[in-house]
Image (cartoon, rainbow, N blue to C red):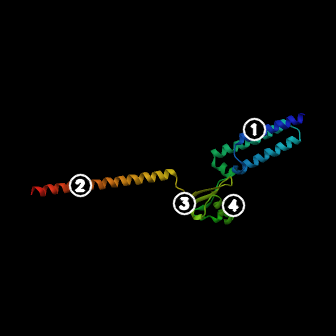
């Protein structure tokens, strides 16, 4: 019976520590976070099959403490981030593929094009910059001519057009008004003569 309570305590501790470690999905985790989660799972598995509840809980807590410490240091110091967490790798710049970086990542042009298509991008030339993030996800920024028009952009353009039209109407109205005044003055002068 003691075995069941220890297993439940280890499971509860593991769930709490994973919640403390963060809410990322596996696809969004860095390599360091994945390794820590796997170490937690391995330690939990060994603890359930062997004895030593306190040792297991301390081991799990130390794994999460190390992860949080490294994450904190990565925020404070860029060299720690580069060394232990990594950085994104650019693969497209100004519509051109950076072949050397693809080779470093062991990604083919076909695989890159597949990622573009998955994101609704039909042409590499439509991409201003693209990179493979530290989580393995594909990040990109489109060229200005390829970006979708937002409601804000549309409203701004309509406001500018309305302003220009109103300004042109005022100018036309002023011209018509001047011409009318000149015609009236000319007519009055002709009547006097």
Please tell me which of labels 2 and 4 falls first in the chain: 4
Q: Residue at x 66, y 44 (%)?
A: 73
Which corner quadrant holds the N terminus? top right
Determine the secondary structure under disc 1: helix
Circle 3 SS class: helix
Q: Secondary structure at mark 4?
A: helix
Residue 3, given in percent of the width and then of the height, sits at 89, 36
- Determine which residue is flagged by label 2: 178
Alpha-carbon distance for marks 2 and 3? 47 Å
Mark positioned earlier in the residue sequence (4 or 3): 4
Mark 1 vs mark 3: give the one in front.
3
Residue highlighted by disc 4: 105
Q: Which is more N-terminal, label 1 or label 2?
A: 1
Q: Quadrant of residue 184?
A: bottom left
Picture coordinates of residue 81, whole percent (x, y): 66, 49
Q: Is residue 117 left or right of residue 7?
A: left
Q: CA distance from mark 1 to mark 3?
A: 45 Å
* Residue placed under numbered mark 3 in the picture: 146
Q: Residue at x 17, y 55 (%)?
A: 185
Q: Residues within 10 Å of mark 4 (few under 14, many from 20)?
A: few
**Residue 172 shown left or right of residue 79 in the figure:** left
Few, some or many C-alpha atoms within 10 Å of disc 3 (few <14, some 14-19, many ≥20)?
A: some
Answer whether labels 2 and 1 touch (C-beta < 8 Å). Answer: no
Image quarter where the C terminus lies is: bottom left
Residue 80 at what x, y percent from top left? Answer: 67, 48
Whether pointer 1 and pointer 3 mark residues with C-beta atoms closer than 8 Å, the reply is: no
Between 58 and 127, the one lying in front of the other is: 127
User: Residue 51 appears in which quarter of the rendering?
Assistant: top right
């Amino acid at each position: 019976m003691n075995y069941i309570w220890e297993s439940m305590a280890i499971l509860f501790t593991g769930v709490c520590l994973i919640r403390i470690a963060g809410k990322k999905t596996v696809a969004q985790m860095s390599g360091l976070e994945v390794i820590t989660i796997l170490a937690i799972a391995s330690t939990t598995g060994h603890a359930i099959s062997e004895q030593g509840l306190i040792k297991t809980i301390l081991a799990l807590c130390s794994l999460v403490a190390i992860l949080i410490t490294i994450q904190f240091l990565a925020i404070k110091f860029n060299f720690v981030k580069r060394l232990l967490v990594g950085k994104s790798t650019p693969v497209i710049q100004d519509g051109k593929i950076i072949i050397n970086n693809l080779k470093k990542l062991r990604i083919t042009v076909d695989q890159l094009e597949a990622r573009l298509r998955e994101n609704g991008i039909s042409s590499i030339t439509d991409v201003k910059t693209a990179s493979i993030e530290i989580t393995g996800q594909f990040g990109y920024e489109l060229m200005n001519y390829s970006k979708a028009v937002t409601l804000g952009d549309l409203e701004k353009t309509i406001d500018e057009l309305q302003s220009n039209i109103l300004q042109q109407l005022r100018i036309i109205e002023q011209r018509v008004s001047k011409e009318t005044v000149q015609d009236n003055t000319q007519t009055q002068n002709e009547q006097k003569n």
